[in-house]
Amino acid sequence: MRSGGGNRYFVNLLRCCREERSKLSGKVIHGFIVRTGLNTDTYISNRLLDLYIECGDGDYARKVFYGMSLRDVYSWNAFLTFRCKVGDLEEVCEVFDGMPERDVVSWNNLISVLVRKGLDEEALAVYERMVSDGFLPSRFTLASVLSACSKVRDGVFGMKCHGAAVKTGLDKNMFVGNALLSMYAKCGLMMDYGVRVFEFLVETNAVSFTVVISGLARENKVLEAFEMFRSMCQKGIQVDSVCLSNILSISTPREGCDSPSEIFCNVLGTQVHSLALRLGFVGDLHLNNSLLEIYAKNKDMHGAELVFAEMPDVNVVSWNIMIAGFGQEYQSDKSIEYLKRMRDSGVEPNEVTYICVLGACFRSGDVEASKRIFSSIPHPSVRAWNAMLSGYSNYEHYQEAINNFRQMQFQNLKPDRTTLSVILSSCARLRFLEGGKQIHGIAIRTKISKNSHIVSGLIAVYSECEKIEISESVFDDCNTELDIACWNSMISGLSRNTLDTKALMLFKRMQQTGVLFPNETSYAIVLGSCSRLCSLVNGRQFHGHVVKSGYVSDSFVEAALTDMYCKCGEIDSARLFFDTVTRKNTVIWNEMIHGYAHNGRGDEAVDLYREMISAGKKPDGITFVSVLTACSHSGLVDTGLEILSSMQRDHKVEPELDHYICTVDCLGRAGRLEDAETLAEATPYKSSPVLWEILLSSCRVHGDVRLARRVAEKLMRLDPQNSAAYVLLSNTYSSVRQWDAAAALQGLINKNRVHKTPGHSWITYDNALD
């Protein structure tokens, strides 16, 4: 039985058992082999090993392997491969380290199991060891390593693998080529390198095209992605549902995309939908969900409802897309309706569902509905609480956000960075210093006080509460870990606290770091500081930086530049810039009208206001304050009265105190004091001291002592400690040389202990910062 023929006999029997997965028969033969001493034969032992591995019997495979008197490369690799499939990483490493010699298969096994276990960086390190030991990678090696590069987004390492593929001629292999495409797509390098890989592939398949399309879409190269899809169809490559899902995912207009318009994307999405129907993918759940998403994101909820109604099968993702879509369209009632239908159909809402409904309610302004939805969540997680708190904060219910945060703490839930950031924002808005300090303490205890979102929020709280020194301390403590949001928050804090010179200096310090680059928010803030400092030199410099950095078309920057030139007296420069803006919003129209008003060019302000109306723009309250101010400063009384009366009549804007102040001032400057008094008495704000101060000031200018006395008495009744009534009346007496009356009034001021607030002034030396 020890002859070569006998060995072949047992080998054939073991192969039959392996093919039939007959472990019991194999064990019988195994026992006979042991009794006859044939287990010392490496070849037969390897066949036994194959049998137990095929049958998935790890214990017997281990006994055979460790019981072998002599193992060859096949023995080591067979057992290593088996342990890799099982996923026993510890034993895999032991077997690998114990191998007397290794081949490419050995290295591939170790790299593969590391990648499957998510130890991608370790897999890349093993690959480097393999190459340094002189082994050339196979297509399986490169596939695993490129997969690891994709997961850790290491494009540089991926390029090294690409070089190895070129050297070994594997770059033309479709298997390796697709892995390269996937790596470049995940690393955001599809346009730079991936497309060239695709062009040099000898053979391509649906996977190749799908990966390229997905990669181009991820880099917002929408037109290129659609062109690739068209090429795929022209070449007769079979389109599957995954590919169509990828195409649908990019059929939405997104910021930064090269797609020309929302209409363009809607048409493309509809075309892809038609193709999906023609190819018979109507029953594919994933594809149908992609269709729902495309219609929802393109704000076509009617189309989404039609698709939803035709879907043979829906899941929680389908319902969530519909609920979120209606929420984006401010239809909270429809979102709530779909939530009810979802429950009635037996599909249990998940956390995302509730968050979508909460967002819909807040977006529609239905705070009470959001409260009811939140209270219906069985056990709200931190993420659900964050959605509720964010809703309150984003829609200016700051006190509610803080109150709910306290309730969250009573539930013994640990707040995360998002929670604390939201509450810090609410504290800043309310100028709630004590609350900000408490959150600061929580952040320190939970060791997230150096997080950029937390730092930015803390700076905002202390700045709003006029504790700018603490803001600077928080900022300086984290100087090496700050992102652009923190810098912007600190610069804004200085600006809000009238430390505009320091704000500009900090901005220049940020530029000097060479690490961070200002964004549109940065420029809008510093241009505001230039406006307040009337620093035209710095303003022009920043204008140049804005143009170079490409932020000149940002709406906030456009408004800030217009305001800066106006405040610096460069009204013509402001108008030149204003005329270059292609998409003017209400804010920039207001800034330009306001600039004309404060530079004494009322006629041009009114003309621009009328041009704004002709352009179809809807004026707001600020627009009317600006144009009425222009009428006041330029003596355009009848125009001002006409604009005031047109507010409610033509534009549905209710006049407020500031509008009446401007009109009373306009009448007063023109000497129409009785008309000004009549208007002040007729307003809903006749109890406001400011209205009467304006009129009293006009009485002084025109020397109307009788009316001045009457208005001053009214002011004194409204606010006895307000020095303005006494000072303005005294100045009126002085202007008509009634010295005795002025002296008597001074005695009354002393008797009533009324204190005048001292004035102050400032100058800018050489129109620039030192």
Image (cartoon, rainbow, N blue to C red):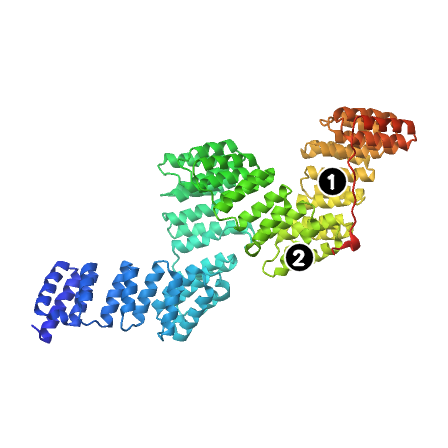
Q: Pick the residue in front: 51 or 512.
A: 512
**Left or right side of 641 for 68:** left
- Give the labeled residue for mark 1: 626
Quadrant including the C terminus: bottom right
Rendering coords of residue 290 (x, y %)? 43, 49
Identify the residue at horizontal 31%, vertical 71% (top origin). 104
Rendering coords of residue 9 (x, y %)? 10, 70
**In the image, is residue 559 above or below residue 41?**
above
**Left or right side of 729 for 275:** left
Q: Pick the residue in front: 315 or 711.
A: 711
Rendering coords of residue 526 (x, y %)? 67, 51
Residue 381, quarter of picture: top left
Q: Is residue 736 shown to the viewer in this render?
A: yes
Q: Secondary structure at mark 2?
A: helix
Amino acid type of the residue tagged 1 in the rendering: Ser
Identify the mark at residue 508; answer none if there is no mark.
2
Q: Mark 2 vs mark 1: which is more N-terminal?
A: 2
Q: Secondary structure at mark 1?
A: helix
**In the image, is residue 230 above or below residue 165?**
above
Identify the residue at horizontal 48%, vertical 66% (top origin). 193
Q: Pick the residue in front: 737 or 678.
A: 737
Q: Sort mark 1 into few (<14), some (14-19) or many (20+) by Cα contacts within 10 Å.
A: many
| Total numbered labels placed on residues in the image | 2
Identify the residue at horizontal 66%, vertical 50% (top origin). 524
In the image as oriented, which residue stretches furthest toward the left?
1
Disc 2 to disc 1, how far (Cα)?
A: 33 Å
Q: Is residue 583 shown to the viewer in this render?
A: no
Rendering coords of residue 426 (x, y %)? 56, 39
Q: Pick the residue in front: 160 or 256.
A: 160
